[in-house]
Each structure stands twice: as C-alpha cells, then as structure tokens.
Image (spheres, rainbow, N blue to C red):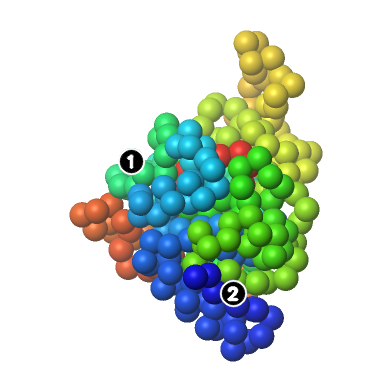
Amino acid sequence: MSRRYDCSDPMERTRGIAEAVSAVRRGELIVLPTDTVYGVGVDAFLAAAVEKLLSAKGRGREMPPPVLVGSVRAATALTEDLGVYGQDLIEEFWPGALTLVVRANPSLMWDLGDTKGTVALRMPMHDLAVELLKETGPMAVSSANLSGRPAARDVEEAEKMLGDSVSVYLDGGVAGHVEPSTIVDLTGSVPRLLRAGAIPEDKIRSVVGVLLTDEDDEDGEPAEPPSSPDVPGPSLTKASPAGSPDEPAEAPTDPTGRPSGSADEPAAPATTNDA
C-alpha cells in the first residue's frame, strides 16, 4: 500500500525522505517533486526496478528513462564524454531544467533499456529532490504519468495515474514549471535540440553557438561549431543547492559496476518525455 508524506511539515519531510530512501533500496518506485514536473523514480542500478518503472508508465525498453543526480561530480562519473560543450552547459544551467544526452561510461553495469550507449543526465534545482538523491545515489526518473498523458504537476495528479504501483509519494506542493526540462543531445559533433522545454532555445544557443533542431535538413551539412569559444573553461565544482555537501571528484567502482563511496554517484540514459 502506498504511503504519502506532506513535505511542507519538517517532521513529515524527514520521515518521508527516510521512507523513500528505504523504498528505493528495496527496488520500489517512489514519486518526488522536481523543479519542472513530478517524477517517478527507482535506483538506476537495479534492472528489475527500472523494468517496474517502465511497466508502471506503460512504456517499453525503447523509451529508457533519464537519470537524475544530486551533484555535478556524480554526473561526470557516469559519462564517457561530455562533448565539446557539455561542461559549458553544465556550468551555465545546472542545477536546473536542462537534460544532457551524452555517451555513458562503458564500465557501468546497468540496464535502463535500449540506450545505444548513451545516458540522459540532469541535476534538478530542487532542495528536496537533491537531498533525496544524495541519499539514494543516481535514480532513473521519468515524468510521473502514464505514457501519453500530461506530466503530473502535483502529487494528487501523480497518485491518480500511478496508484499503488508507487510505494512512497513525497508531496512538495505544485511543481516549479508547466514545461518539462529542455533536452540537448551532445553525442554528435554539433549539439542537437531533442525537446524544447523550460530553458529557451536561444539561451542554449548563447552557450553552444550552433544548435540543430528538427527544422534543420538532416541530410545537409551542419554548420561547423566554433572551434574555440571565447568563454572561460567552466568549473565542474559548481555549488549544489544550499545544504548539499560536495562529492568526491571520482568514485572507484565495485565489481558490479556501481560507483562506491559517496551515495550520490553516476546514473543512466534518457528519453524525450520526462522530468
């Protein structure tokens, strides 16, 4: 049976986070607020839990969920290559409503679905979400809705759609944005907009210069991105939201491929209809 916690009450918030962490470690689904829409999530490294997530939403493996992390350093541990502009975009928009699709670290052993070696990563700008993620580690998180339905903006909407398939609902009030996160693919030579969202296209272009969209002729030659943007190299140690401790720069992996040490470490792939 599902349990719901009103996180506007300090005692309920503490109890709710503890219950959510326990549920995630058991391979169960939880619903959490983010800075965009509500998300439904599981431990990114438990394949059976990811399968439960896809099933609850009515999705197949062809639509793998993105991964949310509680720090920039956790995200970098999950990646093989951030591309030319990854660090610049992280410095400018994280924590925030930008999801980056990058090459996943091939040493990590997880099964998020048919990811083709990529992972969609985001660090939300939401204190409750970040606090939870620092306890659970990377979570596979999709928008809290049934596939094809609008994403939930409050816990009531999420509960109506997902019901008892979710063990713990964390009620953080109305979500921050009507729109989901903007998704940018960095796996090619030129960044590509996969989904318009909370961060406007022009702001992305102000960082990367050239940004391909569906309106571009994919058969033509894309414009060459600037070879050396006149911008100082961004730091990957940007402070997380208040109250969140820094993570170690690197985390050794155990034999299963899960990063060890800090709980807030690497995660997995993404789709184009998520929180």
Q: Amino acid at mark 2?
A: Arg
Q: Which label is found at residue 151?
A: none
Q: Nearer the viewer, residue 219 or 63?
A: 63
Looking at this view, is 233 or 121 the one in front?
A: 121
Q: Residue at x 69, y 65 (%)?
A: 156
Instruction: Specify whether 258 is left or right of 246.
Output: left
Q: Amino acid at mark 1?
A: Pro
Q: Is residue 11 shown above or below 30? A: below
Of the two numbered discs 1 and 2 on the same chain, state the one appearing first in sequence. 2
Residue that label 2 marks: 4
Identify which residue is drawn at 70% across, 24% down: 214
Between 267 and 46, the one lying in front of the other is 46
Q: Secondary structure at mark 1?
A: loop
Q: Residues under labels 1 and 2: Cα distance?
A: 37 Å
The residue tagged with tag 2: helix, strand or loop? Answer: strand
Residue assigned mark 1: 106
Quarter location, residue 225: top right
Q: Residue furthest left?
A: 255
Q: Is residue 104 above or below residue 91?
A: above
* Relative image position of residue 122 (x, y in whole percent): 57, 52
Would you say residue 152 is visible in this rendering?
A: yes
